[in-house]
Amino acid sequence: LESLSAKYDCILYTLGSETQQRFRLKAASLDRYFKHVYVFLHKEQAALMQIISEVKCDPDLTWMIGNSAASDIAPALNVGLNCIWIQTEHWLYDDANIDDAKVHKITSLEQVEPILTSWEQSLANKH
């Protein structure tokens, strides 16, 4: 997170109690890595669109990095974001139907930066 937040505007999109989630972030000293923190009671496409609108993200240049196919990756694909799915555990809830061709699948947060670097290089080569 330290390396990623030094290069990118990291935004946390999570669910639960706002007070509890912000307390957890601060207690774990993770709050400093996020430019914005959004806590919702339910993760859904409308909430994601609200964040994109408020932060003024360009979906073509924005990445969702999440561990849930159903609540992170599928909604992000639906609004046109690039996606990295950190596959750590498997829940039946996560049996979302996603287009694997549009998703980078990884097992560790350390694998994110090389994907983003490669993507940035491919963008630079197009221009």
Image (cartoon, rainbow, N blue to C red):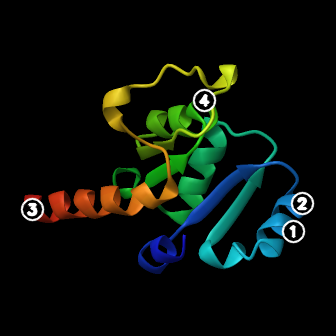
- Circle on res. 20: 2
Direction from residue 61 to residue 68 in the image, left or right: right
Tell me how far mark 1 sits from mark 3, CA to CA: 43 Å
Instruction: Provide the residue designation for mark 1.
Output: 23
* Mark before the other along the chain sequence, 2 or 3: 2
- Label 3: which secondary element: helix
* Cβ atoms at labels 4 and 3 below 8 Å apart: no
* Cβ atoms at labels 1 and 3 below 8 Å apart: no
| Front-most of residues 74 and 45 | 74
> How many other residues sit within 10 Å of disc 4, few (<14), some (14-19) or many (≥20)?
many
Q: Residue at x 47, y 80 (%)?
A: 6
- The amino acid on which the numbered mark 2 sits, given as a three-letter code, is Gln
- The amino acid on which the numbered mark 4 sits, given as a three-letter code, is Ala
Please state the horizontal and vertical placement of residue 71, each as a whole percent of the image. Answer: 63, 35
> How many other residues sit within 10 Å of disc 1, few (<14), some (14-19) or many (≥20)?
few
| Front-most of residues 51 and 123 | 123
Q: Residue at x 50, y 57 (%)?
A: 109
Up the image or down, 108 lies above or below 42; here it is: below
Tell me how far mark 1 sits from mark 2, CA to CA: 5 Å
